[in-house]
């Protein structure tokens, strides 16, 4: 799931809500901006929350091993700021056809506590 939106649009809040809805028992952490990834166990399996905001090159994606979450392991993966790295939209679709990829776009709404939300299936 690719989470998109401006700063403060609610990407991390949305991710935490998904984690809770999938049964994560430990308290979901905030955005993994500095850690790059937070990994959780849930009844549905492993869930990974990635934040690509502070990465500066595609090499950093490779060195951090982030590709393993998509092609080498069975995970539900939530990715903030994937649009900064077009490599994700080109390569994230599972080569074996097992993964569904959704883009969730959040926008500021009519007040501070309202968001507009759009969900698109981009790979099936």
Image (spheres, rainbow, N blue to C red):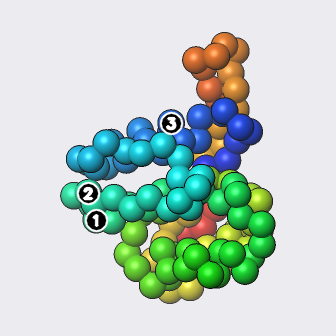
> In x, y percent, where is residue 80?
61, 53
The secondary element bearing badge 1 is classed as strand
Q: Is residue 118 left or right of residue 86?
A: left
Residue at horizontal 69 percent and vertical 75 percent from the top: 60
Return the residue at label 1.
Answer: 45
Q: CA distance from mark 3 to mark 1?
A: 21 Å
Please state the total of marks drawn on the protein image.
3
Q: Could you say where residue 12 lies in the image, as x and y percent from the top left?
A: 54, 42
Residue at screen point 51% across, 66% down:
100
Q: Residue furthest front?
A: 34
Rate crowding at label 3 as few (under 14), some (14 to 19) or many (20 or more) other CA atoms within 10 Å. some
Query: Residue at (28%, 60%) from the top-left corner?
Result: 41
Left or right of 70: which side holds 75? left
89 versus 22 height, above or below: below
Asked if the residue at tag 3 contacts the one at tag 2, i.e. Cβ–Cβ closer than 8 Å, the answer is no
The answer to whether residue 120 is seen in the rendering is no
Task: Tell me the residue at 67%/47% (across/down).
Answer: 4
Q: Position of residue 110 (x, y in %)?
A: 70, 15
- Residue 118's tag is none
Tell which of 1 and 62 is nearer to you: 62
Which tag, 2 or 3, sits closer to the chain's start? 3
Image quadrant in which the C terminus is located = bottom right
123 lies above or below 58: above
Q: What whole-number distance in Å separates the C-alpha atoms at marks 2 and 3? A: 18 Å
The N terminus - image quarter: bottom right
Is 39 situated left or right of 86 in this image? Answer: left
Tell me the SS state at disc 2.
strand
Disc 2, disc 1: CB below 8 Å?
yes
Q: Report the residue that reaches farthest toward the top.
A: 111
Residue tagged by mark 3? 13
Q: Which residue is mark 2?
A: 42
Q: Nearer the viewer, residue 29 or 102?
A: 29
């Amino acid at each position: 799931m690719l989470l998109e939106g401006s700063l403060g649009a609610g990407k991390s809040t949305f991710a935490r809500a998904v984690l809770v809805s999938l049964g994560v028992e430990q308290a979901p952490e905030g955005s993994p901006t500095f850690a790059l990834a937070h990994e959780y166990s849930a009844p549905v399996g492993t869930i990974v929350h990635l934040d690509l905001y502070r990465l500066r090159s595609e090499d950093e994606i490779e060195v951090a091993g982030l590709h393993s979450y998509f092609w080498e392991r069975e995970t539900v993966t939530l990715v903030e700021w994937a649009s900064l790295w077009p490599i994700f939209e080109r390569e994230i679709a599972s080569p074996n056809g097992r993964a569904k990829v959704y883009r969730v776009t959040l926008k500021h709404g009519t007040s501070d506590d309202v968001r507009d939300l759009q969900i698109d299936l981009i790979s099936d």
